[in-house]
Amino acid sequence: MNIHWTPMTTTGTRSIPQVGLRAMDTAATDFDAIRQSMAKTNELFSSEVFGKRNFAALDQIYTRNARVLPPGAPMVSGRQEIKGFWFDMIRYMNAKSAALESVDVIASGDGVVEIGKATIMAQPAGEPEAQVQMKYVVFWKQEDGQWKWHVDIWNMNA
């Protein structure tokens, strides 16, 4: 998107950015394409990682240097460690499915921030099936032409 800031005024404030209608249309189209790419990646996470326990699919979801910040646990860095984390978590929870829903998507520097809600169906050993409601924030970055999760943090609803 081509946004041109006007110079600082003598009072040290900036005036409102001048964005041409054509630039806004192009940016909206580009942003729509980014959102569609994000939706495909989120669906891949749900269908492959949770649905089929295909942890190799995480290579298409997380960047090489991604970080996961799980609630109440240490930070996990890098794809191999992230694969191990999800393998252990899905197996422990006996998770059956995950449904991700974007609530807001915000452009941020060289990436995009997604705020969302998730519902996980799980049945830990010896317990009835349960629906776990969560909220999350993912910072997305483009890697090898694909939008991927770079920082992933969430917590459960009370």
Image (tube, rainbow, N blue to C red):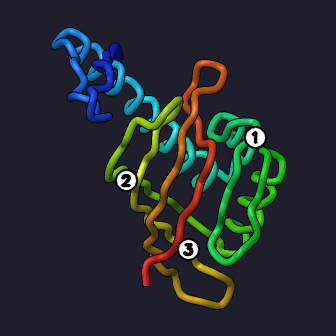
- What residue sits right under mark 2 in the picture? 101
Q: Position of residue 141 (x, y in %)?
A: 57, 33
Q: Residues within 10 Å of mark 2 (few under 14, many from 20)?
A: some
Residue beneath disc 3 = 122
Q: Residues within 10 Å of mark 3 (few under 14, many from 20)?
A: many
Left-right relation of 16 to 78: left
Relative to residue 85, is residue 32 depicted above or below? above
What SS does tag 3 mark? strand
Location of residue 108 (image quadrant): top left
Q: Residue at horizontal 59%, vertical 54%?
A: 152
Dot 2: element? strand
Q: Position of residue 122 (x, y in %)?
A: 56, 74
Q: Residue shown at 66%/20% (left/top)?
A: 144
**Residue found at the very far bottom of the displayed protein:** 126
Q: Earlier in the sequence, mark 2 or mark 1?
A: 1
Residue 99 x %, y %: 44, 57
**Quick one: SS at disc 1?**
strand
| Residue in front for this viewpoint, 121 or 101 | 101
Q: Residue at x 42, y 38 (%)?
A: 39
